[in-house]
Image (cartoon, rainbow, N blue to C red):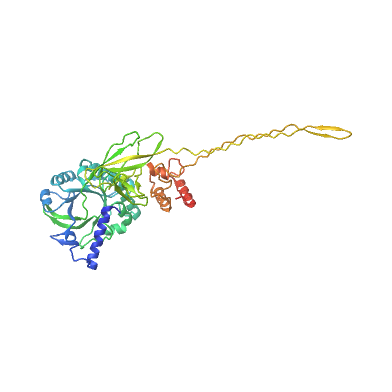
Amino acid sequence: MNIKRLICFILSLSLIATFCFNVSAEKSGFFYENKQWNFYENDKITSIQGVDFSEWNEDIDWNKLKSSGIEFVFLRAGYRGWGVAGTLNKDSSFDSHIQAAIKAGLKIGVYFYSQAITLKEAEAEAEFTLSIIKPYRNYIEYPVVFDTEYAGTPAARTEGLTRRQLTDITGKFVDTIRRANYTPMVYASPSWFNESLYQDEVQEMADIWIANYRTSSPTYFSPYTVWQYTELGSVSGADGNIDRNVSLYNYSRLEFTLRFNANGGTGNIPDMICTYNTENYYPICSFIKSGYDFKGWSAHRQSDDKWIYTDGNGNSDWFFENEQPSGWYKSLYRDSAWVGTTTKVKGDVVTFYAEWQKKVEPTTTTVTISPTTTTTKPTTTTTKATTTTTTTKPTTTTTTTTTTTTTTKPTALPSGRLYGDVNNDGFVNLIDIRLACLHIMNGDKLSGEDLLASDMDGDGKFTVFDVSTMLKKRAEGLR
C-alpha cells in the first residue's frame, strides 16, 4: 500500500469511528453541503472538488468553473470502440479541453475507456494514451486512469471475460503507464471491483477512483483516493448533467532531479527528472571501475545535506554523514529499480553514488603430492651343494603430482542480492518460488538484476529449470 492510499485508508477508518462510535464531537467525515460532498477532518475540509469531461461536454466556461471551487478535472484522452474491430479513437475534444483547463489553472488527470480483451490490446491502449498526452506531460498532475466498467450492450467486447483475464488486462495497462512515470489509477464501481476484478490485486497495483452514486459514503471498504459521487451533478460554468468527484488526496506535482555519480568509476548516466510519490524507474548502472564490481547506490539529498542510512533490520532514515546512530550504515539502492519518496522538496537534487567492492577471484585449492621412490636391495642365498644368487632389480614407484582446482559459485550478485531472491527482500523462500511461478505462467520477460537473480543455471534465460533449482536451494535451507 503506498503512502497516499494509506492516508485515505486512515481517513476512512476515522469516518467509521466517528459515525459508529462517536469518538469525537468535531466535524469529521463526509458531509453533503451546497450540492456537493466534502470530507472534513477535525472541522476542516481536507478534500478537493473536481469534475470529468469528454467530447460530450461542450461550451464550458473554464474560468467560471475554476472560480466556483472546482480544482481538478479528469479528461477523456480516448476510447476503444465496440465490436470485432475495436478501433482506438482519440477523444475529439481532448486537445481543446486540456488547453483550456491549463489556461484556467486546473489540476489535470486523464482517462481511457477500455474494451481490451488481450494483454497486447491493453498495452496498445496505454501506449495510445501516452502518445495523446505526450505534448501535455508537464501539466498532468493527477493520475492516468484505466476506465473499466459494465458496458450494458451485446456489442461490448469485454462481455464474457473472466475475472483473471480482466485483472491481468488491467495490470498490463497500469504497468505500462507506471513505467512512463505517470501515476496509474483504475476507475470502476464497487460491484465491478468486487465481482469482475480481483480487487485485492488491483488495490496493490494502482490508486482507486470509485464510482458510487446515491450514497452518503462509498460502499467500497478499501482505500481509494477519488470518489465520483454523482453522474447527475451540476456546476457553474458547464451545462447539463455533470459527473462530480471529490479527491481525498492532493496530487499536485512535486519534481526533483536524480543525479548519478560514478564515485571513482568511469562512464555517464544522464540526470532524471522524477515526480514525488511516483515510481520513477532508473536505469541499470553503466559505470565501470577496473578491478571492482558494482555494489549498489548510496543516496545523498542536496536540500538538507543528508545521506540515507539503515540499521539492517528494515529501518532507514536520513542523517548527516558519519552522524548516524551506532550500528547504522549507508543504505544501498539496488540496481535498475525505482525511487519515489526520497525527497519532499520541490526542485531538490538527489545524487546516487555508485558503491564498489573489489572483484572476488575464484577460489583455487592446489594439492601437491611429491614423487616417491622405493628401492629393494639385491638378496643373495647360499647352500652347501649349490650356490644360488638371486638379484632383485631396484624398483621405482613414482606418483605423479596432481593439481585440483575448485571454483565456488558465489551465492549472491555483486550488489549483495541473493541468487533466487526474486522479490529482493534478502531471503530465498516460498514467496520467491511463488512469484517465480507466476512470472513463468504470465510469460513475463525479466531483465537486469531481476533476471540475474532469477537465472539460477546461468544460461541467460528464466525458465522452469531455474524454479526447480530454487526449490532445491529452499530444501537445503539457503537463506
Q: Quarter of the image containing the N terminus?
A: bottom left
**Residue furthest out toward the right:** 385
Image location (x, y in percent) of residue 308: 31, 46
Q: Where is residue 89 in the image (x, y as percent from the top left)?
A: 23, 45
Q: In this view, does 400 lie to the left or right of 46?
A: right
Point 28% across, 59% down: residue: 222
Residue 446 seen in render: no
Q: Which of 69 and 250 is in front in this view?
A: 250
| 16 is higher (above) or lower (below) than 166 | below
Closer-to-camera residue (226/9): 9
Image location (x, y in percent) of residue 169: 32, 50
Q: Residue furthest bottom?
A: 21
Could one spot residue 268 in this view of the protein?
A: yes
Residue 417 rendering spot, x and y as whole percentages = 40, 45
Determine whether, in the image, residue 381 is placed left or right of residue 117: right
Please count the marks in the image: 0
Q: Which of 20/395 is in front?
A: 395
